[in-house]
Image: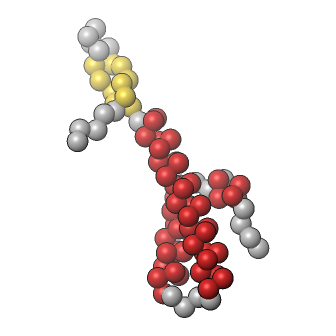
Amino acid sequence: MKETHHDIQSLSFEEAFGELESLVQQLEEGKLPLEETIRLFEKGSLLAQHCQALLDKAELRVQQLTEGADGEPQFTDFEVEE
């Protein structure tokens, strides 16, 4: 059964990342026929894109709780110092 792009989009980050790790293991063993290797590579590419999209979305939601000038708590975007 071929998994569709929609099936992958419905996975949580943890589910998609777990599947991606499993695929990488299978590919690293190098014991698969060429067609199966290509199919797993394509699926892995979709899983990686999905994981990245979920991470990007999560990054936009991360906020930092700070104290405002009036002493009240306020949320501000979390900024990573590089």
How is the model colour-coded? secondary structure
- Is residue 5 shown above or below 19? above
Asked if one can make out residue 36 in the rendered structure from this viewpoint, the answer is: yes
Asked if one can make out residue 15 in the rendered structure from this viewpoint, the answer is: no
Give the position of the C terminus as an image quadrant. Answer: top left
x, y percent for residue 71: 27, 12
Outermost residue on the top side: it is: 70
Q: Nearer the viewer, residue 33 or 55?
A: 33
Residue in the image at 66% along x and 82% along y: 35
x, y percent for residue 51: 52, 55
- Is residue 8 shown above or below 80? below
Give the position of the N terminus as an image quadrant. Answer: bottom right
Task: Answer with left or right where residue 80 lies relative to residue 32.
Answer: left
Please tell me in which quadrant of the rendered image residue 2 appears: bottom right
Task: Answer with left or right where residue 77 lies relative to residue 11.
Answer: left
Residue in the image at 65% along x and 58% along y: 8
x, y percent for residue 63: 39, 31
Q: How many marks?
A: 0
Residue in the image at 41% along x and 36% along y: 62
Outermost residue on the right side: it is: 1
Residue in the image at 56% along x and 64% along y: 45
x, y percent for residue 70: 28, 8
- Is residue 6 shown above or below 75? below
